[in-house]
Image (cartoon, helix red, strand yellow):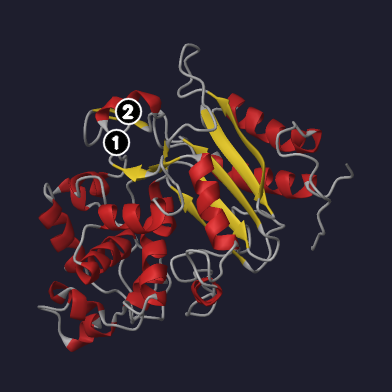
Amino acid sequence: MSFVPHPERSANEPDSRFSEAYSVLHQAISDHAFPGCAFGLLLDGQVLFADALGRFTYESDSPSVMPTTRYDIASLTKVVSTTAMAMLLYQRGQLDLDMPVGEVLPGFIIGRDAVQHGRNVTIRHLLAHSSGLPGYVPLFHTATTPYAVLRGCLELPIEAEPGTRAEYSDPGFILLGKALETIVREPIASWVTREIFSPLAMTATTFCPPSALRAEIPPTEDDELFRQRVIQGEVQDEHAFLLHGAAGHAGIFSNIPDLLRFSTAILTSGTNSLFLPATIELFSQRQPPPGSSRALGWDTPSEESSSGQYFSRQSIGHLGYSGCSLWIDLSAKLAIVLLTNRTWPHRESQLIRSVRPVFHDAVRKALYKPL
């Protein structure tokens, strides 16, 4: 279904058209899908709303969530940091997408024979989650240092011929982050801060928030398995924690205003923007194998997608394990951001899966109601 939106009255006035979307989030909080959330909508370069509901935790005296509240955005790191870095390096001529990973990280191919396909894995395969690497391996059960985590990822079996199987892979993006660091000879955290976050005025976006800010960040989990303490203001992902909080797959903390600024940079690509149109077009195209919804670093809408029914095929987005999401419709010039800590106090609840598409649908339908 396609729509043509009505002109927006004012980004500063409450708009009753979005009452259904607000009701979805209120109900989600009531159902304990998450204790609170921040959310924002960008359309044609204008912020239609940036708002928040609920609290940091389910306790009545817990701080209220604000639109500026920073969240652990988990795997949104993959697009806001790592993929964005790859996009800039590619358009600057510093990154060959078809470069074998082994040329940048020799440890990836040392010890592998030809049958293991290691020499055929490229940067493109890592971005498209088609490298043949497994999706998730709990290396943190035995690894205790950054070296051990990286070594574990380098030595993982390649379970399928590159390009023939799509499997969302955290280890693949850990290796991608390390490969990009090797290319620029600089830690990913400092590079993306200087080259992406600072130019876009994303002042709240960071790896490893200072300890003084931790109380201002909603907790993600009462961790009884790994760290045996409440995780608040430090990355929830165990492998990112072992990698000192900054990795290619997770580690970023951000808020609604900053993620809408990032979305604006994607939607207003051009000669005076951070990203060129050709770069956006390339990285938003679905990649092999046939049937995969994965583009280069980004996901695209698929059947029963978290984006709901109304995002076009010219859309890109990503999810975060902590309960965050970012979807950008390139043809509609629209972006929706939802930040939650759905893993509080424990990560078992999967209610967020049903909340996301209903929320997105409610927002999209609201845009086309008469004023």
User: Residue at coordinates 80% horizontally, 33% vertically from top-left?
Assistant: 16
Quadrant of image for the C terminus: top right
The disc, 1 or 2, on the residue closer to the chain's N-terminal end is 2
Q: Determine the residue positioned at 36% across, 61% down.
A: 82
Residue furthest to the front in view is 272
Q: Which residue is mark 1?
A: 234
Q: Amino acid at mark 1?
A: Glu
Indicate the amino acid at tag 2.
Answer: Arg
Image quadrant occupied by the N terminus: bottom right
Please determine whether, in this image, residue 30 is positioned above or below residue 125: above
Nearer the observer, 273 or 6 = 273
Relative vertical location of residue 279 with respect to residue 247 in this rendering, above or below: below
- State yes or no: discs 1 and 2 in contact (Cβ < 8 Å): yes
Query: In the rendering, at what x and y percent does residue 227 appear?
Result: 21, 33
Q: Quadrant of residue 358?
A: top right
Question: x, y percentage for residue 365?
Answer: 78, 48
- Secondary structure beneath dot 2 equals helix
Q: Is residue 12 visible?
A: yes
Q: Secondary structure at mark 1?
A: loop
Identify the residue at horizontal 23%, vertical 80% (top origin): 118
| Residue at the image point whose x is 35% and y is 63% from the top | 169
Q: Nearer the viewer, residue 95 or 101?
A: 95
Question: In this rendering, which labeled residue sits more in front, label 1 or label 2?
Answer: 2
Mark seen at residue 214: 2
